[in-house]
Amino acid sequence: MKLNKLLLTTSVFILGLSACNNASKKVEPLVVYEAYGTATGFPTEIVNTFKETYGFDCDIPSIGSETAEWEYEVGPDLLYCYNALYLKTEDNGTPGTDALEDAYLATLTEKGITVDDTYYDDYGYMVYDENDTVLLEFYSYNSKFCLYAFAYTEETESFPTDYLNRFLALLEVKERNIPAPQNAEGTKWHYVASSIAFTAWVDDDGTPGTDAIEDSYKLALEKAGWTIDDSDYEYAGYYATKDVLEICFYSWEGYFNIDIYLQDSEAAEL
Protein backbone atom coordinates (compact mmCIF):
# COMPACT_ATOMS: atom_id res chain seq x y z
CA MET A 1 0.00 0.00 0.00
CA LYS A 2 1.46 3.35 -1.04
CA LEU A 3 0.34 6.64 0.49
CA ASN A 4 0.12 9.21 -2.29
CA LYS A 5 0.62 12.40 -0.32
CA LEU A 6 1.49 13.83 3.02
CA LEU A 7 -1.50 13.60 5.36
CA LEU A 8 -2.76 17.09 5.98
CA THR A 9 -4.33 16.26 9.31
CA THR A 10 -2.74 13.01 10.36
CA SER A 11 -2.07 12.93 14.06
CA VAL A 12 -1.55 10.04 16.45
CA PHE A 13 -1.30 11.34 20.00
CA ILE A 14 0.62 8.68 21.88
CA LEU A 15 1.04 7.87 25.54
CA GLY A 16 4.55 9.25 25.44
CA LEU A 17 3.24 12.82 25.46
CA SER A 18 3.83 14.74 28.67
CA ALA A 19 1.01 14.27 31.16
CA CYS A 20 -0.42 16.94 33.44
CA ASN A 21 -0.47 16.73 37.20
CA ASN A 22 -3.35 17.50 39.48
CA ALA A 23 -2.81 16.93 43.19
CA SER A 24 0.32 14.91 42.24
CA LYS A 25 -1.76 12.48 40.19
CA LYS A 26 -0.31 11.66 36.81
CA VAL A 27 -2.84 11.34 33.98
CA GLU A 28 -1.86 9.64 30.75
CA PRO A 29 -2.96 11.67 27.69
CA LEU A 30 -5.74 10.28 25.54
CA VAL A 31 -4.76 8.50 22.32
CA VAL A 32 -6.46 10.05 19.27
CA TYR A 33 -5.93 9.08 15.64
CA GLU A 34 -7.05 11.46 12.89
CA ALA A 35 -6.09 11.21 9.21
CA TYR A 36 -7.33 11.80 5.71
CA GLY A 37 -5.81 11.45 2.26
CA THR A 38 -5.48 9.00 -0.62
CA ALA A 39 -3.65 5.73 -1.15
CA THR A 40 -2.79 3.43 -4.04
CA GLY A 41 -4.01 -0.03 -3.11
CA PHE A 42 -6.15 -0.86 -0.09
CA PRO A 43 -4.92 1.35 2.81
CA THR A 44 -4.01 -1.50 5.16
CA GLU A 45 -1.68 0.65 7.28
CA ILE A 46 -4.45 3.18 7.91
CA VAL A 47 -6.93 0.41 8.76
CA ASN A 48 -4.53 -1.29 11.17
CA THR A 49 -3.73 1.97 12.99
CA PHE A 50 -7.44 2.67 13.36
CA LYS A 51 -8.01 -0.83 14.78
CA GLU A 52 -5.07 -0.63 17.18
CA THR A 53 -5.85 2.89 18.39
CA TYR A 54 -9.51 2.31 19.11
CA GLY A 55 -9.50 -1.39 20.01
CA PHE A 56 -11.58 -2.40 17.00
CA ASP A 57 -11.77 -6.21 16.90
CA CYS A 58 -13.86 -6.88 13.79
CA ASP A 59 -11.89 -8.01 10.73
CA ILE A 60 -11.63 -5.48 7.88
CA PRO A 61 -10.31 -7.50 4.92
CA SER A 62 -8.60 -5.77 2.01
CA ILE A 63 -10.30 -5.63 -1.38
CA GLY A 64 -9.59 -4.34 -4.87
CA SER A 65 -6.47 -4.28 -7.03
CA GLU A 66 -3.03 -3.04 -5.98
CA THR A 67 -3.43 -0.07 -8.33
CA ALA A 68 -6.88 1.03 -7.13
CA GLU A 69 -7.02 4.59 -5.78
CA TRP A 70 -8.61 4.91 -2.33
CA GLU A 71 -9.78 7.92 -0.37
CA TYR A 72 -9.76 7.58 3.41
CA GLU A 73 -10.78 9.57 6.46
CA VAL A 74 -10.25 8.52 10.06
CA GLY A 75 -11.22 10.21 13.28
CA PRO A 76 -13.79 10.81 16.03
CA ASP A 77 -17.32 11.80 15.02
CA LEU A 78 -18.36 14.32 17.68
CA LEU A 79 -21.99 14.33 16.57
CA TYR A 80 -22.64 10.60 16.93
CA CYS A 81 -19.99 9.84 19.58
CA TYR A 82 -17.94 7.18 17.85
CA ASN A 83 -14.57 6.86 16.13
CA ALA A 84 -14.98 6.25 12.42
CA LEU A 85 -13.05 4.96 9.43
CA TYR A 86 -14.35 5.94 5.98
CA LEU A 87 -12.95 4.35 2.80
CA LYS A 88 -14.02 4.95 -0.81
CA THR A 89 -12.83 3.79 -4.25
CA GLU A 90 -14.04 3.56 -7.85
CA ASP A 91 -16.41 0.67 -8.60
CA ASN A 92 -17.66 0.13 -12.15
CA GLY A 93 -19.42 -3.14 -11.39
CA THR A 94 -23.15 -3.76 -11.14
CA PRO A 95 -24.50 -4.23 -7.59
CA GLY A 96 -25.94 -7.70 -7.19
CA THR A 97 -23.60 -9.24 -9.77
CA ASP A 98 -20.00 -8.06 -10.03
CA ALA A 99 -19.68 -4.90 -7.90
CA LEU A 100 -17.13 -4.63 -5.10
CA GLU A 101 -19.94 -4.90 -2.56
CA ASP A 102 -20.66 -8.38 -3.89
CA ALA A 103 -17.02 -9.40 -3.64
CA TYR A 104 -16.78 -7.97 -0.13
CA LEU A 105 -19.95 -9.74 0.94
CA ALA A 106 -18.45 -13.03 -0.28
CA THR A 107 -15.15 -12.35 1.50
CA LEU A 108 -16.78 -11.60 4.84
CA THR A 109 -19.08 -14.60 4.52
CA GLU A 110 -16.12 -16.88 3.81
CA LYS A 111 -14.49 -15.58 6.99
CA GLY A 112 -17.56 -16.52 9.00
CA ILE A 113 -18.70 -12.93 9.55
CA THR A 114 -22.49 -12.50 9.52
CA VAL A 115 -23.65 -9.76 7.16
CA ASP A 116 -27.13 -8.26 7.46
CA ASP A 117 -29.08 -6.85 4.51
CA THR A 118 -32.20 -5.70 6.39
CA TYR A 119 -31.53 -2.04 5.58
CA TYR A 120 -29.73 -2.62 2.31
CA ASP A 121 -31.92 -0.25 0.27
CA ASP A 122 -31.13 2.65 2.60
CA TYR A 123 -27.67 1.94 4.04
CA GLY A 124 -26.21 -1.07 2.26
CA TYR A 125 -24.85 -4.14 4.07
CA MET A 126 -24.23 -4.11 7.82
CA VAL A 127 -22.14 -6.11 10.28
CA TYR A 128 -23.28 -5.98 13.91
CA ASP A 129 -21.77 -6.99 17.22
CA GLU A 130 -23.55 -9.11 19.84
CA ASN A 131 -25.37 -5.99 21.12
CA ASP A 132 -26.76 -5.13 17.67
CA THR A 133 -24.37 -2.20 17.33
CA VAL A 134 -23.18 -1.48 13.78
CA LEU A 135 -19.47 -2.25 13.29
CA LEU A 136 -19.20 -2.21 9.48
CA GLU A 137 -21.27 -0.73 6.68
CA PHE A 138 -20.51 -1.14 2.98
CA TYR A 139 -22.18 -0.63 -0.38
CA SER A 140 -21.62 0.14 -4.06
CA TYR A 141 -23.45 3.18 -5.43
CA ASN A 142 -22.91 5.68 -8.24
CA SER A 143 -19.72 3.92 -9.38
CA LYS A 144 -18.22 4.09 -5.90
CA PHE A 145 -17.57 1.44 -3.26
CA CYS A 146 -17.82 2.76 0.30
CA LEU A 147 -16.68 0.94 3.42
CA TYR A 148 -17.23 2.35 6.91
CA ALA A 149 -16.11 1.07 10.32
CA PHE A 150 -17.30 2.36 13.70
CA ALA A 151 -15.48 2.03 17.04
CA TYR A 152 -17.25 3.05 20.24
CA THR A 153 -16.08 4.11 23.68
CA GLU A 154 -17.56 2.07 26.52
CA GLU A 155 -20.83 3.48 27.86
CA THR A 156 -20.73 4.40 31.55
CA GLU A 157 -23.41 5.03 34.17
CA SER A 158 -21.45 7.88 35.71
CA PHE A 159 -19.88 10.81 33.89
CA PRO A 160 -16.57 9.68 32.27
CA THR A 161 -14.31 11.94 34.35
CA ASP A 162 -11.20 9.79 33.87
CA TYR A 163 -11.61 9.89 30.09
CA LEU A 164 -12.17 13.66 30.21
CA ASN A 165 -9.03 14.13 32.31
CA ARG A 166 -7.01 12.17 29.75
CA PHE A 167 -8.37 14.49 27.05
CA LEU A 168 -7.37 17.53 29.12
CA ALA A 169 -3.91 16.01 29.60
CA LEU A 170 -3.70 15.71 25.83
CA LEU A 171 -4.35 19.46 25.63
CA GLU A 172 -1.80 20.02 28.42
CA VAL A 173 -4.46 21.65 30.61
CA LYS A 174 -3.31 21.50 34.23
CA GLU A 175 -6.45 22.81 35.92
CA ARG A 176 -9.15 20.16 35.74
CA ASN A 177 -11.77 21.58 38.11
CA ILE A 178 -14.76 20.56 35.99
CA PRO A 179 -17.88 19.44 37.91
CA ALA A 180 -19.46 16.21 36.69
CA PRO A 181 -23.07 16.48 35.43
CA GLN A 182 -25.44 14.30 37.43
CA ASN A 183 -27.57 11.94 35.35
CA ALA A 184 -30.51 9.79 36.39
CA GLU A 185 -29.94 6.26 37.66
CA GLY A 186 -30.06 3.69 34.86
CA THR A 187 -28.99 6.12 32.12
CA LYS A 188 -25.60 5.81 30.43
CA TRP A 189 -23.14 8.29 29.01
CA HIS A 190 -22.02 8.18 25.37
CA TYR A 191 -18.79 10.07 24.77
CA VAL A 192 -15.79 10.58 22.51
CA ALA A 193 -12.99 13.09 21.99
CA SER A 194 -11.03 14.43 19.05
CA SER A 195 -7.71 16.24 19.25
CA ILE A 196 -9.56 19.50 19.98
CA ALA A 197 -12.87 18.69 21.69
CA PHE A 198 -14.58 16.31 24.14
CA THR A 199 -18.29 15.60 23.77
CA ALA A 200 -20.78 13.48 25.71
CA TRP A 201 -24.50 12.97 25.95
CA VAL A 202 -26.96 11.14 28.19
CA ASP A 203 -30.73 10.71 28.37
CA ASP A 204 -32.48 13.51 30.24
CA ASP A 205 -36.18 13.32 31.08
CA GLY A 206 -36.24 16.65 32.90
CA THR A 207 -37.82 19.89 31.74
CA PRO A 208 -35.35 22.65 30.78
CA GLY A 209 -35.78 25.61 33.10
CA THR A 210 -36.95 23.47 36.02
CA ASP A 211 -35.43 20.04 36.61
CA ALA A 212 -33.35 19.16 33.53
CA ILE A 213 -29.67 18.24 33.85
CA GLU A 214 -28.75 21.61 32.31
CA ASP A 215 -30.38 23.35 35.29
CA SER A 216 -28.50 21.45 37.98
CA TYR A 217 -25.29 21.64 35.97
CA LYS A 218 -25.56 25.41 35.55
CA LEU A 219 -25.75 25.74 39.34
CA ALA A 220 -22.81 23.37 39.84
CA LEU A 221 -20.63 25.34 37.43
CA GLU A 222 -21.53 28.67 39.02
CA LYS A 223 -20.66 27.25 42.42
CA ALA A 224 -17.29 26.10 41.05
CA GLY A 225 -16.50 29.61 39.81
CA TRP A 226 -17.36 29.26 36.12
CA THR A 227 -18.81 32.24 34.22
CA ILE A 228 -22.11 31.39 32.52
CA ASP A 229 -23.25 33.03 29.27
CA ASP A 230 -26.87 32.47 28.17
CA SER A 231 -26.93 35.10 25.41
CA ASP A 232 -27.09 32.40 22.72
CA TYR A 233 -29.18 29.95 24.72
CA GLU A 234 -32.04 29.54 22.24
CA TYR A 235 -29.61 28.54 19.49
CA ALA A 236 -26.76 26.72 21.22
CA GLY A 237 -27.52 26.38 24.93
CA TYR A 238 -25.32 27.67 27.75
CA TYR A 239 -21.63 28.55 27.51
CA ALA A 240 -19.38 28.43 30.55
CA THR A 241 -15.79 29.71 30.70
CA LYS A 242 -12.97 29.47 33.23
CA ASP A 243 -9.22 29.79 32.78
CA VAL A 244 -8.49 28.41 29.26
CA LEU A 245 -11.55 26.18 28.89
CA GLU A 246 -15.05 26.62 27.51
CA ILE A 247 -18.04 24.34 28.04
CA CYS A 248 -21.17 24.31 25.90
CA PHE A 249 -24.10 22.41 27.43
CA TYR A 250 -27.84 22.05 27.03
CA SER A 251 -30.84 19.77 27.54
CA TRP A 252 -32.97 19.24 24.46
CA GLU A 253 -35.60 16.73 23.32
CA GLY A 254 -34.86 14.13 25.95
CA TYR A 255 -31.09 14.27 26.21
CA PHE A 256 -28.31 16.35 27.75
CA ASN A 257 -25.22 17.25 25.72
CA ILE A 258 -21.88 18.70 26.82
CA ASP A 259 -18.86 19.84 24.78
CA ILE A 260 -15.52 20.88 26.32
CA TYR A 261 -12.62 22.54 24.49
CA LEU A 262 -10.02 25.32 24.66
CA GLN A 263 -11.52 28.81 24.38
CA ASP A 264 -9.23 29.88 21.53
CA SER A 265 -9.31 26.59 19.60
CA GLU A 266 -10.94 25.68 16.31
CA ALA A 267 -13.68 23.89 18.28
CA ALA A 268 -14.82 27.20 19.76
CA GLU A 269 -15.71 28.38 16.27
CA LEU A 270 -17.91 25.37 15.44
Image: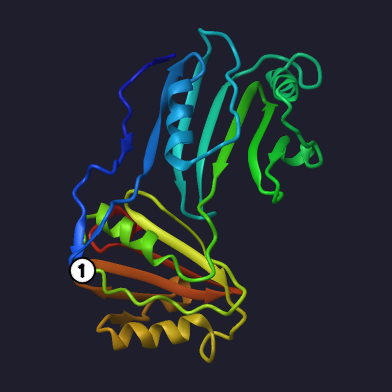
For residue 15, above or below residue 78 = above
The amino acid marked with disc number 1 is Glu
* Disc 1 element: loop
Name the residue rendered at 27%, 80% in the picture. 226
What is the basis of the colouring in this image? rainbow
Q: Is residue 84 left or right of residue 49?
A: right
Query: Residue 45: x and y, percent?
Result: 43, 23
For residue 241, above or below residue 107 = below
The number of callouts visible is 1
Name the residue rendered at 70%, 47% in the picture. 130
The quadrant of the image that shows the N terminus is top left
Query: Residue 4: x and y, percent?
Result: 37, 16
Picture quadrant where residue 74 is located: top left
Instruction: Sort mark 1 into few (<14), some (14-19) or many (20+) by Cα contacts within 10 Å.
Output: some
For residue 133, above or below residue 36 = below
Q: What residue does disc 1 label?
A: 175
